[in-house]
Image (spheres, grey):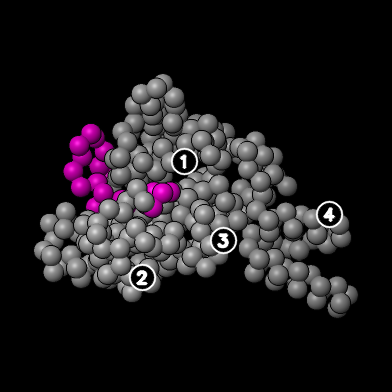
């Protein structure tokens, strides 16, 4: 297999052609204690895509997420959103880019779910009636309209994650960035979140950034994968190219998705090539079926 080139080998500077919704150009961020959050970070978000930031804890994923809508400012470099450079105090950037945090409790504060989801639209200048309509629409998008009158403190972790997503959706952003969107969730709510992410892109034209160390999740839903190490993106590409590069992933402290591990075990133990490199269970099953059918005919 041809070795996948790293970002540094392919493009020693940040590519910017003006079509990006978000463009992070060689950004660095140094915290007050001197620790480096991101370093020479080059990142972009394109129209109508799900892009996964994959890296272990402490690699810089969360720091990058917080730069995308101005929660943090770079110490050097720049962040450009919808063609405009984000400066300290840039107004209304959160209208274009919404962020959900890893800890849902950091975003929920109102007495009821509906009040919480209405908060953003009201701060955008909507009337109470219009904000209520936007909030209910957003709750319906995530399948949580039945929770409107509930108190956020008494919701489950999965329900809280849905409400946080609704609160961002109610402001109708162009991009939503999610920090570990399925961490600590049960399988039911994990499946719900994954489907919502896909629907945001496919049905509503919203680009989604997910920061995760769960490569199985990234394999199932991402269009493009960026590998993060030491505060920088060291490689990016299609999931099939990234996830079959074991050496690259191990250098970043990551393991290949389980489907990829299974495929390579089958290939090693049987010598049967399954055709295209599958990255989902469905694709793996189809490849195995095709290979077995071909052997029977032979």
According to the image, label 2 marks what residue? 144
Q: Nearer the viewer, mark 3 or mark 2?
A: 2
Find residue 220 and name its label.
3
| Mark before the other along the chain sequence, 4 or 2 | 2
Residues marked 4 and 2 touching at CB (< 8 Å): no
- Residue corresponding to mark 1: 61
Left/right placement of residue 110 relative to residue 32 reads left
- Side of 230 relative to 144 (left or right): right
Of labels 4 and 1, earlier in sequence is: 1
* First to last magenta residue range: 83-104
Mark 4 sits on what residue?
268
* Mark 4 vs mark 1, CA separation in Å: 34 Å
Mark 3 or mark 2: name the one nearer the start of the chain. 2
Secondary-structure class at tag 4: helix
| Residue 121 higher or lower than 55, as above or below | below
How far, Cα to Cα, is label 3 from label 2? 23 Å
| Residue reaching furthest to the bottom | 297
Observer able to see residue 19: no
Residue located 29% across and 40% down the image: 70
**Label 1 with label 2: CB-CB less than 8 Å:** no
User: First in sequence: mark 1 or mark 2?
Assistant: 1
């Amino acid at each position: 297999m041809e070795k996948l080139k790293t970002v540094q080998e392919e493009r020693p500077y940040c590519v910017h052609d003006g079509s990006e919704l978000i463009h992070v150009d060689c950004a660095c961020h140094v915290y007050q204690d001197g620790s480096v959050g991101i370093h020479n970070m080059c990142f972009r978000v394109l129209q109508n895509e799900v892009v996964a930031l994959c890296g272990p804890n402490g690699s810089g994923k969360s720091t990058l997420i917080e730069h995308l809508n101005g929660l943090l400012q770079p110490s050097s470099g720049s962040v450009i959103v919808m063609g405009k450079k984000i400066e300290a105090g840039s107004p209304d950037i959160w209208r274009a880019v919404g962020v959900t945090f890893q800890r849902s409790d950091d975003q929920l504060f109102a007495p009821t779910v509906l009040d919480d989801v209405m908060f953003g639209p009201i701060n955008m200048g909507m009337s109470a009636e219009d904000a209520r309509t936007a909030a209910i629409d957003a709750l319906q998008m995530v399948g949580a309209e039945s929770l409107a009158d509930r108190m956020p403190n008494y919701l489950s972790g999965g329900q809280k994650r849905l409400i946080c997503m609704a609160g961002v959706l109610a402001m109708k952003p162009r991009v939503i960035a999610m920090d570990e969107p399925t961490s600590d969730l049960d399988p039911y709510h994990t499946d719900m979140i994954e489907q919502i992410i896909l629907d945001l892109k496919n049905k509503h034209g919203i680009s989604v950034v997910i920061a995760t160390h769960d490569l199985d999740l990234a394999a199932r839903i991402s269009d493009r994968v960026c590998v993060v190490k030491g505060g920088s993106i060291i490689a990016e590409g299609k999931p099939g190219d990234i996830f079959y590069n074991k050496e690259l992933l191990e250098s970043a402290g990551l393991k290949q998705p389980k489907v990829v591990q299974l495929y390579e075990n089958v290939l090693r133990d049987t010598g049967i090539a399954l055709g295209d490199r599958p990255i989902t269970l469905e694709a793996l099953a189809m490849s195995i079926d095709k290979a077995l059918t071909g052997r029977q005919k032979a």
